[in-house]
Image: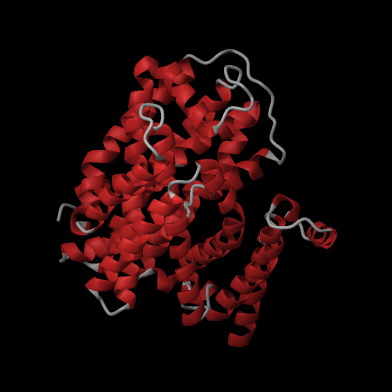
Amino acid sequence: MNNTKTVFIIGFALFASFFGAGNLILPPQLGFNSGPDWWLVALGFITSATIIPLMALFGHAKLQGTMLDFGNKVSPLFSLVFCLCVYSIAITLPIPRTAAVTHEMAIQPFFSTPSLLTSSLYFGLAFIFVMKRDSILSILGKFLTPLIVLILLAIIVIGLFTAPETMNPSVLKSPPLVAGLLEGYQTYDALGGILIGGVVIISLNLEGGVSFKDKKAIIAKSGLVAASGLFIIYAGMIAVGALHNTEFEASISRPGLLSGLSLKTLGNIGNLFLSVLISLACFTTAVSVIVGTADFFKGLFKESQTAYTVTAIISCLIGILIGQMDVKYIIDVALPVLMFIYPLTVVLIFLNIFPEKYASKLVFKTVVLTTFVFSIPDFLGFLIEADWLTRIKELIPFANQNLGWVLPAVATFFIANLLSRINRD
């Protein structure tokens, strides 16, 4: 195996997989709303949508197992429940969103066909690719990603050099760094890191003859390739959205803004290019995540190919049903779910990349429990409005920015490590 070639193929495939789920519609509007503060927003967005997913891949490089290994130090039961939650979320929210975005951006502007037809054809084709999973990384890495990157770079470069001299001020309701961080949740890239990383492990195992050490290096280097691409594209699209925010109505939708930017930068053919881009970016993510979900259940049922096929069918059927809905509705519904699962995902990722002496079972259990407890107000805040909940959030640092779990988790990490050292001594 040519390791250098493999690194770039997998890196490009990871980039395409992370960048899908309709993620292209998020950065431009974030920049549009932030104006001169776009660089702070970009810093927050890149942290949650690029750095944390990269850490997830480093965790996979270290563990080289399945997603179950990320939570096993808490308990096998917790790990199973966590994985089931992640996979359930993956196939009911981001994956159907890829079909919804494809319809609104690539089909609806040109054809009057119903969204049900789009989602049916979309997931029918996805099922065919999923059943050809042995070649999925090669297909995504060699053929689809380069086209995506070229179109995006054209929009960014032209957009940067043709921007007006003035910008509208920020209209963000929260600090720019926090706004970017939380908007990065909507990319699902942290979940994608622990989910798609498992696909990479299995694909490398199918190649055969790759040592543990080589696999570790390949995964880590591929992650860096993908993260570099995400950094350039996400930061570039946020900047372009900010620099051109005087040229569009304040109420413009995410898809409308992206479409407008493509027309301004690429001319009349921009929408055609954008349609191809949206379709490819979304489709690559849908296929990768369905493959990852099917692989998980195949392993759960003793390498049953039937379990793999049934999971793929169920995932595609759910995609067809939910993929008919509006993109905005799917994004709004996802917010409370992400407030619940993202904090747990982030702490598990970081705990798994720490050296063993700093990440004992006691540390895992206490940090995860603390994170869960202090993320409850963030989760409830998107479901209900109550005075008692407001009072609780006022007592927790950063809870009003939906980050109330961060300081308690960090403090618990240090306290648990101190207790572990005392017990050893």
Coloring applied to the structure: secondary structure
| Residue at (58% x, 86% y) in the render | 424
Q: Is residue 61 above or below residue 73?
A: above
Q: Quadrant of the C terminus?
A: bottom right
Task: Tell me residue 219's x, y (percent).
Answer: 32, 57
Residue 225 visible in image: no
Q: Quadrant of the N terminus?
A: bottom left
| Residue at (49% x, 78% y) in the render | 73
Count of marks overlaid on the render: 0
* Quadrant of res 201: bottom left
Horizontally, is 189 left or right of 272 in the view? Answer: right
Q: Is residue 260 above or below residue 52?
A: above
Task: Tell me residue 190's x, y (percent).
Answer: 48, 55
* Quadrant of res 365: bottom right
Task: Tell me residue 261's x, y (percent).
Answer: 47, 22
- Between residue 215 and residue 20, name the one nearer to us: 20
* Quadrant of res 195: bottom left
| Residue at (78% x, 58% y) in the render | 393
